[in-house]
Amino acid sequence: MCVKTRLSYEWEESRTVNGILLMNIGTPDEPSVRSVRKYLRQFLLDPDVIDIPAPLRHLLVRGIILRVRPRKIAPSYSSIWMEEGSPLRVYSERMADGLRMRMADAACEVGMRYGNPSIRHALEKLRHKGVQKLLLAPLFPHHAQATTESSLKEAFRQLNKMEWEPEIFQLTHFEDDPSFIDPLSESIQPHMREGAHLLFSYHGLPVSHVKRTDKTRLHCQVKDSCCSIKCSANSMCYAHHCNMTTMAVVEKLGLSDSDWSISYQSKLGPTKWLTPSTLSMVEKLAKKVDNLVIVSPAFVADGLETLEELDIEVRNHFIVNGGKEMTVVSCLNDNPSWLNGLENLVRDAFLNPMIPD
């Protein structure tokens, strides 16, 4: 006998058209210097990404970064490009496909903050489908100015331009939600053989971005172990959210303190970023452990930062410094357990709307 839960019953009773906008950071259209330059220009000129005065930002990006970086990283994109296109876009679309299969009564589209398909393009498709209740779903487990906030700002900016006013719901950060932690832990578990050391490598952020979320100015980077203390001052702190994910996985896997470390990758520019860096941590671990396992929980879809930076650049650094065996755990991508978890997060966001912290 099939027993309907309250959750499924309430969802099926809804007669309005529900829409889901999955938002990810973005990717070049192709692995060419020209396409990479176009993508980086849009990405790096966003004041939510490099939040220095506009004249300095344009000087840094247009005068320095765009002259050098596109030629440097275009071959890196080529090395990870899939037959269907950019991995980040392919896996984001597969997540949308997974939700469509699980939630046939909802429309779902992918919108990239930078590049294509754009957030505007996705919103136009959802409006065309008659969506009345719209969930804005940033695919970022940890809240950050440069990802979550920037994506939401762009979504609301485009909604205003379109003069479209559906009922809005938001998927908030889900750093320690079991719907995320359980599939993440399951993906790590097979690699944790005896003697393995787990490194949580999160995408880095400027310290200024993190400190800005502490409205009291009395906690972040002021108190010892500020990221491990849960309080109102760090409720929207990226580093605190990363710590919450780490501790939830550590508990789930039953790891001791000596079994894991934490670091931050992908530093860009001269400003002070969160530490320790992944490269420095890997260099240190290469002399201590024989089997290093790296996971990057800030990304739910594989892209340049995981497939090239971690699996190629960081791996080489590990070997050069005396390391032996290293495994990079794939992002959750279209893992069925994660798609089930994402469905739970989406349904919960629709049925239990939250006021963002």
Image (tube, rainbow, N blue to C red):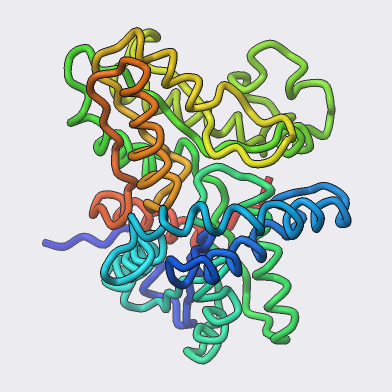
Q: Quadrant of the N terminus?
A: bottom left
Q: Is residue 218 left or right of residue 48?
A: right
Percent of width and height locating residue 259: 33, 13
161 or 131: nearer the viewer = 161
Give the vertical position of 50 relative to 160 (above or below): above
Visible in this render: residue 42?
yes
Q: Is residue 241 left or right of residue 79?
A: right
Q: Quadrant of residue 159?
A: bottom right
Q: Is residue 337 left or right of residue 119?
A: left
Percent of width and height locating residue 161: 74, 83
Residue name at image x 58 percent, y 73 percent: 119
32 or 90: nearer the viewer = 32
Percent of width and height locating residue 49: 69, 51
Give the vertical position of 198 relative to 99 (above or below): above
Percent of width and height locating residue 178: 38, 39
Q: Quadrant of residue 268?
A: top right
Q: Is residue 262 left or right of residue 80?
A: right
Visible in this render: residue 6?
no
Q: Quadrant of the C terminus?
A: top right
Residue name at image x 58 percent, y 58 percent: 353
297 or 89: nearer the viewer = 89
Residue name at image x 46 percent, y 68 percent: 32
Which residue is most to the left?
1
